[in-house]
Amino acid sequence: MAHHHHHHGSEAGDRRMIWAIGVNLALTLAQIAGGILSGSLSLIADALHNFSDAASLVIAAFARRIARRPSDATMTFGYVRAEVVAALINYTTLIVIGLYLVYEAVMRFITPEPIEGWIVVGVAVVALLIDLVTALLTYTMSKESMNIRAAFVHNVADALGSVGVIIAGTLILLYDWQIVDPIVTLAIAGYILWQAFAEIGGAIRMLMLGTPPDVDVAQLIERLCGIEGVTDIHHVHVFAIDERLTAMEAHVVVAEGHGETADAVRNRLKQIANAEFGIAHSTLELTIGRSCCEAGEAKVIGHRTGRSAGTDGSNGHQH
């Protein structure tokens, strides 16, 4: 029953993504037509910016579909990280767009360009409405997925761009305040860069097999070492397979007298890792008897193996 519910949820999400892509592509075509009719280069430029939004949604939707593929011989972890790769691509393009907007704003301060009439403001209002529709279509999914969140931020950035055009265009047409345009552009660029840099670190961390920020590895080792029968835990690696699944690998040494209860010890360790640290997938190698490490090194993460490792000037071998 749960499987079918998830499947229907995925299909509903896919439909929302298709609608979001469709309305953004329609807006892009409308902006290009409006730009040609009004002779407005800025409107055509905004159409190209909006096309980058549609492209970000296409990347997000494509990655979403790939991520649902089952694992196979070539991808034993499955394809779930396709969404993380898509998020990295979309946040990177956001940073490029943000930096380009900063450049454009600075150039506008130096050489102001006139706004090309009410048609630009009118199309910006339509663009804002489309952006709001897209935001509504993707908002719920953005809470659960780094991938969709990246596309959502693209969309919010574009909505802010439309608001900026409306505010700046109206003030310039009514009061001839040319300085408003680059000021608003800088504010939007600042928001885009702030959001992109705040989010891109999570995608990079996951792709580099970094420990999830909510897991304290030292505390985890301390807690697991306190279980009866456990004398040593080392070679500990904690990493996120995707946004919802955290995994752990570790070598556990069980005391001599607990050989017969080794499976019970393993199950207890997995239970604690899951319940207290949110680690749902644990691969634990158990050894009975003496540790391969010296006592002082037992709890060191990725410890140096052997008694004299690292004494030759090297930094030892990290597992």
Image: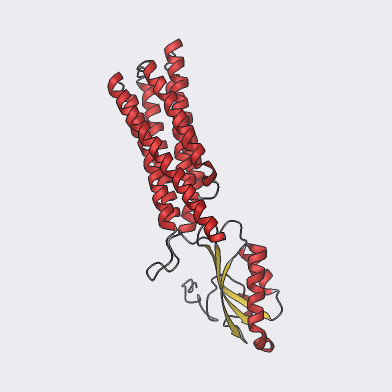
Image spot of residue 185 (x, y percent): 44, 27
Image spot of residue 225 (x, y percent): 67, 74
Q: Nearer the viewer, residue 255 or 74?
A: 74
Q: Is residue 120 left or right of residue 163?
A: left
Q: Residue at x 55, y 46 (%)?
A: 143
Residue 279, can we see it? yes
Q: Residue at x 71, y 74 (%)?
A: 226
Q: Is residue 194 depicted above or below 37 in this figure? A: below
Q: Nearer the viewer, residue 200 or 170?
A: 170
Q: How has the structure been colored for display? A: secondary structure
Quarter of the image for residue 274 reads bottom right
Q: Is residue 318 depicted above or below 216 in this figure? A: below
In the rendered picture of this protein, how many numbered marks are placed on residues?
Answer: 0
Q: Nearer the viewer, residue 9 or 185?
A: 9
Q: Is residue 207 left or right of residue 214?
A: left
Position of the N terminus, as image quadrant, is bottom right
Image spot of residue 25 (x, y percent): 36, 36
Q: Residue at x 44, y 52 (%)?
A: 64
